[in-house]
Image: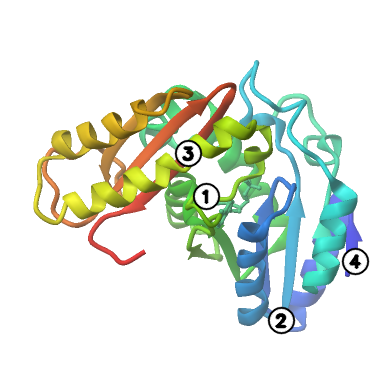
């Protein structure tokens, strides 16, 4: 495993591999790695000659007052995990290395980035798109691996790659969950014992909603069931629960089988997101 911290070195390495006709698989992360991240890496390792995993906590996707400073950064542990996993390159640039100019040009996703997460976190997805575009140019991957856990992010990146003609295929990877169903997330470490226990309601409510959607096609009724279940947990405070079209992410009134239920819920100071696709086994 090789650790690269410089933009110039990352670019020359990937250019050299491209000239040799090698396929590079890319897994962008913010670190604090868990099995979810490693499942993306594993898939990349199966499908490519080399796998690059980036660890970069991107300041441009955090809003003022969010957890940028306190976001976990256990670099030594992450490097150990990557080594054990057999990752070829870990790209871990500093903020100054990625954003060398004070003012940068942003990639603006438009409406798809302003709804759901984008409503609560305005500007979040322009930060995500901008850094992912930069990383794609540096790593030059044939395929890049993203988790369905962050459904909106995945859909936006897929659209960005299409709209801006990136030569990278976006690969969707299933959400890896804890035994009780909670989606693995680097932010789960913020939860105290009671919050952690109660957080399992998210996946339970999604699964039960999916079951209900087999006979009930009215989204409002399905949403009401989820909201009722979540509000039964004393420490949970719902930010949103929406049933949206899987492509446009616009809300739908009637279930046709191509929808995703997306939700964001606070447990104390921690905001968790999850989702479940309807009409598909997951
Ligand atoms: P993050 O480090 O949280 O920015 O996540 C990096 C990548 O890992 C993103 O594509 C996420 O969607 C993906 N990811 C995070 N958690 C999970 C999970 N539990 N299962 C699968 N993929 C995940």
Q: Is residue 236 visible?
A: yes
Image depth: mark 3 or mark 4 in front: 3
Whichever of callouts 2 and 1 sits on the residue coming sooner in the sequence is 2
Give residue 62's mark: none
Which residue does the numbered mark 3 point to in the structure image?
273
Cα distance between the residues tagged 1 and 4: 30 Å
Which residue does the numbered mark 1 point to in the structure image?
183
Point out residue 254 in the picture as x, y percentages from the top left corner: 11, 43
Which residue does the numbered mark 4 point to in the structure image?
2
Which residue does the numbered mark 2 point to in the structure image?
49
Whichever of callouts 3 and 4 sits on the residue coming sooner in the sequence is 4
Is label 3 in contact with label 1 (beta carbons under 8 Å)? Answer: yes
Whichever of callouts 3 and 1 sits on the residue coming sooner in the sequence is 1
The one nearer the camera, 137 or 95, is 95
Please say if 159 is above or below 114.
Answer: below
Cα distance between the residues tagged 3 and 2: 33 Å
Image depth: mark 2 or mark 1 in front: 1
Whichever of callouts 1 and 4 sits on the residue coming sooner in the sequence is 4
- The residue carrying pointer 1 sits among few (fewer than 14), some (14 to 19) or many (20 or more) residues within 10 Å by Cα, namely many
Point out residue 220 in the picture as x, y percentages from the top left corner: 16, 33
Cα distance between the residues tagged 2 and 1: 29 Å
Whichever of callouts 3 and 2 sits on the residue coming sooner in the sequence is 2
**Residue 243 falls in which quadrant of the image?**
top left
Whichever of callouts 2 and 4 sits on the residue coming sooner in the sequence is 4
In which quadrant is the C terminus drawn?
Answer: bottom left
> Helix or strand or loop: what does disc 1 sit on?
loop
The one nearer the camera, 8 or 238, is 238
> Helix or strand or loop: what does disc 4 sit on?
strand
Q: Is residue 106 visible?
A: no
- The residue carrying pointer 3 sits among few (fewer than 14), some (14 to 19) or many (20 or more) residues within 10 Å by Cα, namely many
As drawn, is 227 to the left or to the right of 121?
Answer: left
């Amino acid at each position: 495993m090789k650790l690269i911290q410089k933009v110039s070195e990352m670019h020359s390495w990937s250019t050299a591999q491209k000239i040799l006709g090698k396929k590079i698989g890319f897994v962008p992360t913010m670190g604090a790695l868990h099995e979810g991240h490693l499942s993306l890496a594993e898939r990349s390792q199966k499908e490519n000659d080399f796998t690059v995993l980036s660890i970069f906590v991107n300041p441009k996707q955090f809003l003022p007052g969010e957890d940028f400073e306190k976001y976990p950064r256990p670099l030594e542990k992450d490097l150990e995990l990557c080594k054990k996993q057999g990752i070829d390159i870990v790209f871990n640039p500093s903020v100054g290395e990625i954003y060398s100019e004070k003012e940068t040009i942003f990639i603006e996703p438009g409406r798809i980035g302003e709804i759901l997460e984008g409503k609560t976190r305005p500007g979040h997805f322009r930060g995500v798109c901008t850094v992912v575009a930069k990383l794609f140019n540096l790593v030059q991957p044939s395929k890049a691996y993203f988790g369905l856990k962050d459904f909106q992010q995945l859909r936006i990146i897929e659209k960005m790659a299409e709209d801006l003609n990136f030569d990278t295929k976006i690969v969707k990877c299933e959400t890896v969950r804890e035994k009780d169903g909670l989606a693995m997330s680097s932010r789960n470490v913020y939860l105290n014992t009671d919050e952690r226990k109660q957080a399992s309601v998210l996946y339970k409510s999604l699964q039960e909603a999916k079951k209900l959607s087999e006979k009930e096609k009215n989204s409002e009724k399905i949403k009401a069931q989820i909201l009722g279940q979540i509000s039964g947990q004393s420490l949970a405070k719902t930010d949103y629960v929406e049933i949206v079209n899987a492509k446009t992410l616009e809300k739908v009134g009637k279930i046709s089988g191509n929808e995703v239920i997306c939700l964001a819920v606070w447990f104390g100071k921690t905001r968790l997101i999850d989702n479940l696709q309807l009409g598909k086994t997951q």
